[in-house]
Amino acid sequence: MPNGSCITSYRAAALMAALFLAGCAGGYSPQESCADLSKSVWPWRTMTGMATETLPSNSPLNVIQPESVVRVSGTLPPDAKYQEPTPALFQCVYSGDVLRSFGWIEPQMLADPNFSYSPG
């Protein structure tokens, strides 16, 4: 193999690695990703007036990737089951920047799949 093609292969590999890392660390914060995740989990009924909050970490100081909890709060618009706007709360748990779990906390109908709704 000629020496020039070997250098070209290394350059191509370095370029691919740089592009991969740029895509992974594109400035997308846990707050932004949790807010987007709450929209994608239930896209036909998105929250309005959304606000994000990062809760204080309970992780020990000596862990490599501390756990953080991000909550997205807002209001769900009225529909057939809720005749008036309903407060909603969605939570994401991260270890460093890696999403570990997510789910609805409020309303109970979304948080608990076994919940049976009976109006009034």
Image (cartoon, helix red, strand yellow):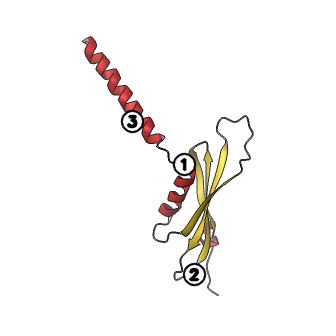
Q: Residue at x 59, y 56 (%)?
A: 102
- Dot 3 and dot 2 residues touching (CB under 8 Å): no
Q: How far across and how far down the image is residue 92, in percent? A: 60, 54
In front here: 16 or 101? 16
Indicate whether 46 appears above or below 21.
Answer: below
- Name the disc covering residue 82, or none: 2
The answer to which quarter of the image holds residue 81 is: bottom right
Q: Please tell me whether mark 3 sits on a helix, a strand or a loop.
A: helix
Which mark is in front, 3 or 2? 3
Q: Which residue corresponds to mark 1?
A: 29
Tell me the distance, in whole angstroms, between the alpha carbons under discs 1 and 3: 19 Å
Q: Which residue corresponds to mark 3?
A: 19
Q: Please tell me whether mark 1 sits on a helix, a strand or a loop.
A: loop
- Dot 1 and dot 3 residues touching (CB under 8 Å): no
Residue flagged by tag 3: what amino acid is it?
Leu
Residue placed farthest to the left in the image? 2
Tell me the distance, in whole angstroms, between the alpha carbons under discs 1 and 2: 32 Å
Q: Residue at x 64, y 38 (%)?
A: 65
Q: Residues within 10 Å of mark 3 (few under 14, many from 20)?
A: few
